[in-house]
Image (tube, helix red, strand yellow):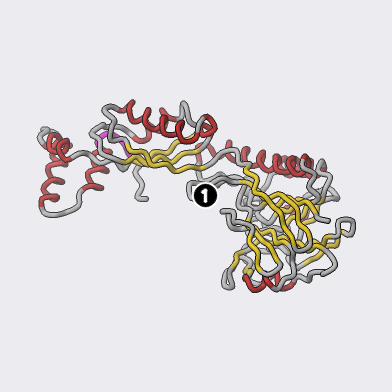
Amino acid sequence: MGVRILHCADVHIGASAGIKRISTRRKAEVLQTFLRIVSYAEENQADLLLIAGDLFDSHKPSKDILEQISSAFSEFSGKVFITPGNHDYYGENTFWESWELPENVMVFKNEAEGLELSELGVKIHGGGFSDVYRNDHILKQMRADESMINIAVIHGDISSDTPYGPVTVEEIQNSNMDYIALGHIHKRSDIIKEGKTSYAYSGCPEGQGFDELYEKGFYFGTVEKGKVEMSFIPICRRRFVEEEVDVSTALKKSDIKNIILHKIDEKYGDEGKDWLYKIVLTGESAVSFSATELGAELESELYFVKIKNKVKTPLKDLTLIAEENSVRGIFVRKMLERAERGENIENAVRIGLAAFSEEVDFDED
């Protein structure tokens, strides 16, 4: 007989996702996504909800947020196990000590602990951070019970040399765990098996920036003695997407906007309109535009857009600009002189011409 579990991690409630102008909205969305995770666990009759660290982004969740989460937990008919991570570690005078949680919730402290759930034939193991760093090997301190299904909830790195909760493959092989629910790495892994033990990173349910692409969610399924059947369930409200768009065919600024929208619609459909985009423009075009203004126009139809301009100006157009009796013409003439000396002027010309069109949001990456 197996036990039905939902494994999530790295929710980072309270994080701004690195985008200041929509940080308030994103914080609210991250919280709502977690509440939907709890609802999913109840609706699908999970026995256990496992949270493998960094439920919160810091030690400053508001009283209102804590009350909303407590209320959601109280409506879940199963049991909740939380392992604090490096962002929301369990230390003296932290919110964990004053948070009024329902009886079905257990928060693991620093030491390795094991709790037997005889009615389910399961032993749950955990041990959280008590500070920003954790150098000891917590999995080695856990003791499996061979007569039960053993599940560990751990926040850490699969590495022998890390300050963030080291766990090694050898330790996993020797743990006698049936499943290890891991947190800390924001990109999910497959369900991996070492010896008799299966383990996985669920990844974060909402991306925190354009370095966290891909679909986000959690794992749900059944764990039996020596057997794990888990499926990844997407749940994120909004995906972060980086898309390269060639605008060589554009003859005017509106063409660039239409080319972008057409590609997004063709590739992602209506669902994609609610996502967050970093659009990298490529190709050759003499069309002058401001990346900031173009991004603002696109946001009338897409939720969030950041434009990165890597469009090259064709050489024939540079020659025409060089004939201008203007500061822009002088700039281009100087650049063409450098090109004749064998210098690569592409990036400098792109930045310079963007500045003349009042585009000032350039960054180096």
Residue 359 is one of the magenta-drawn residues = yes
Q: Is residue 135 above or below residue 154?
A: below
Can you tell which quarter of the image residue 118 is in?
bottom right
Q: Position of residue 16 (x, y in %)?
A: 56, 44
Q: Left or right: where does residue 308 sit relative to residue 115? A: left
Q: Which of 69 and 256 lies nearest the eye of the viewer?
A: 256
Span shown in magenta: 356-360
Q: Left or right: where does residue 87 sit relative to residue 229? A: left
Can you tell which quarter of the image residue 82 is in?
bottom right
Q: Which of 272 and 132 lies nearest the eye of the viewer?
A: 272
Q: Position of residue 95 (x, y in %)?
A: 73, 52
Kindly identify the residue that appears in the image at 52 percent across and 29 percent down. 270
Kindly identify the residue that appears in the image at 24 percent across and 39 percent down. 353
Q: Is most of the magenta stretch helix, strand or loop?
A: loop
Dot 1: element: loop
Q: Which residue is mark 1?
A: 212
Local packing at callout 1 (Cα closer than 10 Å; few below 14, some 14-19, many 20+) is some
Look at the image and tell me whether residue 327 can be seen.
no
Can you tell which quarter of the image residue 206 is in?
top right
Kindly identify the residue that appears in the image at 66 percent across and 50 percent down. 56
Residue 211 is one of the magenta-drawn residues = no
Look at the image and tell me whether residue 320 can be seen.
yes
Q: Position of residue 52 (x, y in %)?
A: 69, 56
Q: What type is the residue that disc 1 sits on?
A: Glu
Q: Position of residue 21 (x, y in %)?
A: 50, 37
